Image (cartoon, rainbow, N blue to C red):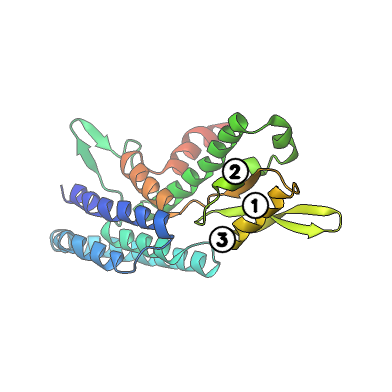
Amino acid sequence: MIELLKVLVCLPFLVYSCYSDIKTRRVSNKVWPIMLGAASPLILYEMITSGLPYIFRTLISFVVIFVFVYILFMLHAFGGADAKVLMVISIILPIFPKLSVNSLQLPFWGAPLLDLFTFSVFSNSVLLTIIVPFGLLLYNIVTVNPKELVKKPFYALIGYRQLINNLQEGHIRLIEKYEETPDGVIPKFTRTGTSIDADTILKLKELHRKGLIGEHVWITPGLPFMIPITAGFLAAVVFGDLIFYLSFNYLVPLI
């Protein structure tokens, strides 16, 4: 019952963080102390009833996740909000919650050998993020001329085409930058993308009006990582560690 309450406490904060990340690409630092505070009565209850073993597991969970996300943050592979939410989860749910829903036992696949719930949340989120390029590819196969896909197959995995007249400022970036040369306009791929603001949109419209570029440009949405984290959290609660399960059941037998 306590573990179910912990999961239910976490979910509203995760959903809000997804909403905030989509709208502004930021999540207020105030969210995480409130989230931890909301779960603190449940944490204290387990510390009192389970004693030192629970406190020890919580300490291990927090230290491992703190070091892990700190390294990723220093390597600029992680945002501050992403790191903080994982650290808070590591305190609230140090090991996999064992839940019963009628006759069902969750997670379906049980806990992995490394019973660190937050680490599995992260690994699930990475795996689920990989699914996004395949969704973009399917969308582009349906909507883009095959000849253009053959010319720029990599673009189909990281973005989609948008009409210049429909472009708006926001959390999307151009996959290419457009350089004017004596021979015309040359589109060049940019690894980090080109930000889209009012001036960029006006320039693109002017280039299109002059017939120097087509009516579409390739853009990349830049998926907020808080969404995969939330999806990874739910997947861990319901199914378990996706990578561990798939590896143990499908890759190991092949070796």
Residue 71 shown left or right of residue 9 in the figure:
right
What amino acid is labelled 2 in the image?
Leu
Q: Quarter-wise, where is residue 202 in the image?
A: bottom right
Going 71% across and 41% down the picture, which residue do you hit? Answer: 152
Residue 32 lies, in percent from the top left, at 30, 65
Which label's residue is closer to the chain start, 2 or 3?
2
Query: Of the numbered discs in the image, which one, if any, rests on residue 205?
Result: 1
Q: Position of residue 12 (x, y in %)?
A: 26, 52
Q: Amino acid at mark 1?
A: Lys
**Which residue is farthest front?**
209
Q: Which mark is residue 141?
A: none
Q: Is residue 212 left or right of residue 130?
A: right
Q: Are marks 2 and 3 in contact (CB under 8 Å)?
A: no
Query: Residue sitting at 76 percent across and 58 percent down?
Result: 179
Q: Residue 163 — which label?
A: 2
Nearer the observer, 60 or 148: 148
The image shows residue 240, relative to residue 43, as above or below, that is: above
Q: CA distance from mark 2 to mark 3?
A: 15 Å
> 189 or 204: which is nearer to us?
204
Which residue is found at the position 35% from the left and 53% from the top? 19
> Element type at marker 1?
helix
Kindly identify which residue carries mark 3.
198
Q: What is the CA distance from the residue labelled 3 to the residue labelled 1?
A: 11 Å
Q: Is residue 154 above or below residue 88?
A: above
- The answer to which image quadrant residue 102 occupies is top left
